[in-house]
């Protein structure tokens, strides 16, 4: 257990990966090319409930440092089309979304890393080469240094082209022509503090979109879609930026805290595992910012990678478990590209026919619920459902139902992230939530009339609990939708792996998690 796992990149995805690996008792070395932390700008601000939960599992409470919002409003020109709130099938302690600057998130993760003796961070270590053999990975740095570990996770961000080439990965996709202007504005906008607002074609940004998010310290993040030839320096010198801001905030005093212009790409690598190296976050996939699916998806990459590397390192699973990382998280990335690509086709129509369709939908959406469902301002981040994973035992009584309505979450079923509810575990006052319990290993939950099962003979930590013992109130059984005779199996990332009625099927369902052999379907 002495060889570390190497993590390339000390951004939020790399930091999270390191902390999760350490939580499983593995030593970690994090390498970053920068000389130190560069806390500039808000960057990725919108953190989803289940990502907040992952950070909480490593002792990092992000939510108290941000602004909670519960309502998403959508407008066309000067008319509100609709709003929606978010569903929680359990009783999570976390809000659906919290807005906090990426810089603050990085600071909080750094504080946790500083207190974690298993994690070392080495700044100024630019990785330029990757070598592998049957025993481990060697990362070669620009300064001539070398670092050897059992595995590596590349979280080097969008600009990790050199490492993608070293690994022989393609990064197919496209870059969009339109630019986006971001301004963090400190001002007072009463009533806007807990809402995300999206405008199609407002009179003050004709033909394009504007998105506004509340942030801490009376700051609002405003994103304007601007033409390909937009120049920020010219806009500022001419007074155009002030005019643009005042079209949103009126004659209130304001302060520009940060501003930037960017283009974005939609790209994904062809695979996310190359031998002992896994690729995660923006190094593996880039998506449109509409829907906040970048950082949130990267953190879920980290959780998936960490428990699987830990199981392989500890001998609880075969090496093929790492193939399931690529299968599951590549499928998640492809779905994100599909969802955000559809958003961009609605935001930036590619033909007169698409423009006419969009205008028709927007004009009808104020009064027609069917048209509202077609309005696409970005489907907000949500966990991927591993219904076709090689680790998942299908349940014909609960077939995959597809994406739920905006703001909703799917009914619990194999592949779906289990809802979180309070639980009581005898002798373990530190375990107060279902997902905290699940993250200790493989978890078997017996419903009221399910027969007792002997301690499973499985690789890795396995715990068996009766649902009524964990929660006599019935909340847990109700949140799962568990029938009285069922046996539920949860993975270490709290996704449901199986729902069974015959105890004889349990050994195979557990073995399928640690030693998968099926292809993703």
Image (cartoon, grey):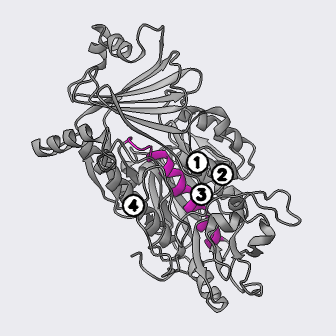
Q: From the viewer's perspective, is the residue at label 1 or at label 4 nearer?
A: 1
Checking the image for residue 89, the label placed there is 3
Q: Which residues are magenta?
A: 289-313
Mark 1 and mark 4 lie on one chain; the one further toward the N terminus is 1
Callouts 1 and 2 close, C-beta under 8 Å: yes
State yes or no: residue 226 in magenta.
no
Residue at the outermost left position: 352
Mark 1 and mark 3 lie on one chain; the one further toward the N terminus is 1
Horizontal and vertical percent position of residue 423: 77, 61
Structural distance between the alpha carbons of marks 1 and 2 = 8 Å
Q: Main secondary structure of the magenta part?
A: helix
> Quarter of the image holding residue 457?
bottom right
Q: Is residue 230 visible?
A: yes
Q: How many marks?
A: 4
Callouts 3 and 2 close, C-beta under 8 Å: no
Q: Is residue 175 visible?
A: no
Q: Quadrant of the N terminus?
A: bottom right
Horizontal side of residue 395 vs 314, given as left or right: left
Callouts 4 and 3 close, C-beta under 8 Å: no
Q: Secondary structure at mark 2?
A: loop
Horizontal and vertical percent position of residue 12: 55, 44
Q: Relative to 465, does residue 504 appear above or below in the rendering?
A: below
Horizontal side of residue 34 vs 377, given as left or right: right
Horizontal side of residue 93 vs 167, given as left or right: right
Q: Quadrant of the C terminus?
A: bottom left
> Quarter of the image holding residue 312?
bottom right
* Residue that carries the numbered disc 2 in the rendered image: 92
> Quarter of the image holding residue 504?
bottom right
Mark 1 and mark 2 lie on one chain; the one further toward the N terminus is 1
């Amino acid at each position: 257990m002495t060889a570390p796992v190497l993590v390339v990149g000390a951004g939020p995805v790399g930091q999270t990966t390191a902390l999760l690996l350490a939580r499983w008792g593995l030593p970690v070395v994090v390498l970053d090319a920068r000389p130190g932390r560069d806390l500039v700008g808000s960057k990725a601000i919108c953190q989803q409930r289940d990502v907040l939960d992952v950070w909480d599992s490593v002792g990092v409470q992000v939510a108290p440092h941000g602004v909670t919002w519960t309502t998403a409003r959508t407008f066309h020109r000067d008319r509100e089309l609709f709003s929606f709130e978010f569903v929680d099938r359990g009783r999570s302690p976390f809000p659906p979304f919290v807005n906090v600057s990426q810089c603050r998130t990085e600071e909080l993760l750094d504080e946790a890393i500083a207190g974690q003796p298993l994690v070392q961070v080495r700044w100024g270590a630019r990785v330029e080469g990757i070598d592998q053999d049957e025993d481990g990975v060697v990362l070669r740095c620009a300064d001539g240094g070398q670092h050897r570990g059992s595995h590596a996770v590349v979280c080097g961000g969008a600009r990790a082209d050199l490492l993608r080439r070293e690994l022989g990965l393609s990064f197919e996709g496209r870059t969009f022509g339109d630019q986006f202007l971001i301004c963090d504005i400190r001002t007072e906008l009463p009533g806007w503090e807990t809402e995300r607002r999206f405008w199609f074609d407002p009179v003050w940004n004709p033909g394009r979109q504007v998105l506004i998010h509340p942030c801490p310290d009376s700051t609002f993040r405003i994103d304007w879609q601007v033409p390909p030839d937009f120049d920020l320096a010219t806009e500022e010198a001419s007074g155009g930026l002030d005019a643009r801001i005042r079209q949103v905030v009126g004659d209130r005093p304001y302060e520009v805290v940060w501003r930037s212009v960017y283009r974005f790409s939609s790209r994904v690598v062809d695979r996310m595992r190359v031998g002992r190296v896994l690729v995660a976050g923006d190094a593996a996939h880039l998506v449109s910012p509409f829907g906040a699916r970048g950082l949130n998806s990267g953190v879920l990459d980290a959780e998936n990678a960490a428990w699987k590397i830990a199981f392989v390192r500890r001998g609880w699973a075969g090496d093929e478990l790492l193939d399931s990382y690529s299968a599951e998280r590549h499928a998640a990335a492809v779905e994100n590209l599909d969802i955000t690509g559809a958003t961009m086709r609605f935001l930036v129509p590619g033909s007169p026919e698409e423009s006419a369709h969009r205008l028709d939908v927007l004009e009808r959406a104020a009064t027609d619920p069917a048209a509202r469902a077609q309005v696409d301002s970005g489907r907000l981040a949500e966990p991927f459902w591993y219904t076709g994973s090689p680790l998942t035992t299908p349940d014909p009584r609960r077939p995959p139902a597809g994406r739920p309505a905006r703001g909703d979450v799917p009914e619990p079923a194999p592949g779906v992230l289990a809802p979180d509810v309070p639980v009581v575990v005898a002798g373990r006052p530190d375990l107060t939530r279902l997902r905290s319990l699940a993250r200790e290993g493989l978890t078997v939950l017996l419903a009221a009339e399910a027969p007792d099962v002997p301690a499973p003979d499985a690789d890795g930590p396995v715990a068996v609990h009766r649902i009524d013992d964990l929660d006599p109130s019935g909340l847990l059984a109700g949140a799962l939708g568990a029938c009285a005779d069922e046996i539920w199996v949860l993975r270490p990332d709290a996704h449901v792996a199986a729902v069974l009625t015959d105890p004889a099927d349990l050994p195979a369902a557990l073995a399928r998690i640690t030693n998968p052999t099926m292809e993703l379907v």
